[in-house]
Image (cartoon, rainbow, N blue to C red):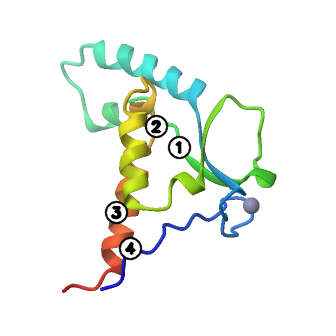
């Protein structure tokens, strides 16, 4: 069985592959910190008759975006950027996740959805043994 294929990243702006040194993934951490604080307030509110619609109003996560450095729509934004060369293998992702878990804003981003998607894509590519 071949080893794990490197994780590829595609730019959300131009749709091209992002080679090492050409870009990374970023999240607006100022927005994520605002979501974190808004969720604390939202979660503290008592809702004795909460409906599913109420839960849909919980402050939404901030998305991670994959972009080439040259395509970045707002390079001045207060974003946290991870170069793609640090995100090529499942071990890279595990290591980065461990590191990011020390950040207060991580849970206010869609990191768990992002890495869950990578894992599902990998499982879909690997034939059963
Ligand atoms: Zn691009």
Residue ID at (52%, 28%): 32
Question: From the image, which quarter does the C terminus lie in?
Answer: bottom left
How far apart marks 1 and 2 lie (CA) works out to 6 Å
Real-space Cα separation, disc 3 to disc 1, in angstroms = 18 Å
How many residues crowd mark 1 within 10 Å: few (<14), some (14–19), many (20+)?
some
Number of other residues with Cα within 10 Å of mark 2, as a class: few under 14, some 14 to 19, many 20 or more: many
Tell me: is circle 2 under 8 Å from ligand 1.
no
Relative image position of residue 123 (x, y in whole percent): 30, 73
Residue in front for this viewpoint, 62 or 85: 85
Residue 5 higher or lower than 87, as above or below: below
Q: Determine which residue is flagged by label 2.
A: 109
Q: Position of residue 23 (x, y in %)?
A: 69, 53
Q: Hey, which quadrant is residue 66 in on the image? A: bottom right
Q: Which mark is residue 22?
A: none
Does 57 sit left or right of 76 as displayed?
left
N-terminal of the pair, mark 2 or mark 3, is: 2
Question: Are the residues at dot 1 and dot 4 in contact (C-beta closer than 8 Å)?
Answer: no
With respect to residue 23, does 59 lie above or below?
Answer: above
**Quick one: label 4 or label 2, which is nearer the N terminus?**
4
**Can you give x and y, in whole percent of width and height, for residue 50 in the image?**
23, 27
Q: Rounded to the nearest whole Å, what is the CA distance between mark 3 and mark 4?
A: 12 Å
Label 3 crowd (10 A; few <14 / some 14-19 / many >=20):
few
Does label 4 point to a residue whose CB lies under 8 Å from ligand 1? no
As helix, strand or loop, the secondary structure at mark 3 comes to helix
Q: Quadrant of ligand 1?
A: bottom right
Q: Are marks 2 and 3 in contact (CB under 8 Å)?
A: no
* Disc nearest the viewer among 3 and 1: 3
Q: Which residue is mark 1?
A: 63
Label for residue 119? 3
Q: Which residue is mark 4?
A: 4
């Amino acid at each position: 069985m071949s080893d794990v294929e490197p994780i590829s990243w595609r730019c959300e702006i131009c749709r091209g592959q992002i080679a090492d040194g050409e870009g990374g993934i970023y999240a607006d951490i100022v927005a994520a910190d605002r979501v974190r604080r808004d969720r604390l307030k939202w979660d503290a509110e008592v809702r004795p008759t909460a409906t599913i619609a109420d839960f849909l109003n919980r402050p939404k996560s901030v998305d991670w975006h994959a972009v080439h450095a040259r395509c970045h729509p707002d390079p001045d934004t207060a974003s946290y950027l991870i170069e793609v060369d640090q995100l090529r293998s499942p071990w890279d992702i595990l290591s980065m996740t461990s590191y990011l878990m020390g950040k207060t804003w991580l849970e206010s981003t869609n990191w768990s959805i992002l890495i869950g998607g990578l894992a599902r894509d990998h499982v879909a590519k690997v034939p059963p043994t």
